[in-house]
Image (cartoon, rainbow, N blue to C red):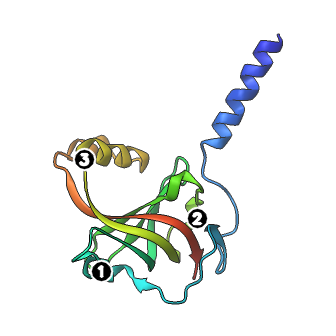
Amino acid sequence: MKNILTIAFSLIVIICAAQPPKGPVTPGTTFGAAVTATGAVAVADLPNLLKDEQSHTVKVSGVVTDVCPKKGCWISLQTPDNTKVFVKMKDYGFFVPVELKGKTIVMEAEAKTVKTSVDELKHYAEDAKKSKEEIDAITEPKEEIRLTASGIVVVK
C-alpha cells in the first residue's frame, strides 16, 4: 500500500511539473536572470549582428508569437519578414507561462545561426500541437537564428 501511494504521489508531481508555470505576465515581470530593457536591439537586427560572427551575446526585443504548451521551455519571436526566431531557455533553468504569447519582451541571450535537423523541427512542431500534415511536411533541415535566453523581462 505504501508503494502505491508513493508511486501515485510521484506521478502527480511529474504531471504537475510538466506544465508551464502560471503567474503574472505584466510589464516588469522577469523570468530567469534579471534583465532591463535598456540597450536592447530589435529582433530584426539579429542577421546583421551575426553576419561576421559565429555567435553573439545580445539584449534583444521582440513580440512572442508562440510558447511551448507542454512546459514553457521555448518561445518564438516574430520578425518583420514573418519568419520566426526560436528561443530556448539556458540550461532549462527557467520556464515561461503560455500567457507570454503576444507580449513584447526583452531578453539577454546568446544568438547564433544553426542548422536545425528535421527530427528536431518535427519535435518542436509536435510540442506546438501542429497537425500531422504540418509535421509530415517538414522534410528539410532549416538554417535559422537560435537564441538561448538567460533572462527575460516583459515590456508590454
Q: CA distance from mark 2 to mark 1?
A: 29 Å
Instruction: Tell me if 113 is positioned left or right of 35 in this view.
Output: left
Q: Position of residue 105 (x, y in %)?
A: 52, 77
Q: Nearer the viewer, mark 2 or mark 3?
A: 3
Tag of residue 99: 2
CA neighbours of label 3 inside 10 A, class few (<14), some (14 to 19), many (20+) = some
Q: Are marks 2 and 1 in contact (CB under 8 Å)?
A: no
Q: Answer with the quarter of the image where residue 26 lies.
A: bottom right
List the single residue furthest toward the left: 140
Vertical side of 149 occupied by 140: above or below: above
Identify the amino acid type marked 3.
Answer: Ser
Q: Earlier in the sequence, mark 2 or mark 3?
A: 2
Residue occupying the point 40% across, 70% down: 77
Mark 2 secondary-structure assignment: helix
Residue indicated by mark 1: 49
Rendering coords of residue 84 (x, y %): 32, 67
* Residue 114 x/y as whole percent: 27, 59
Tell me the residue at 23%/41% (across/down).
136
Residue 38 - label: none
Left or right position of 50 against 18: left
Q: In the orientation shown, which residue stands out farthest toward the right?
A: 2
Sequence-first disc among 1 and 3: 1
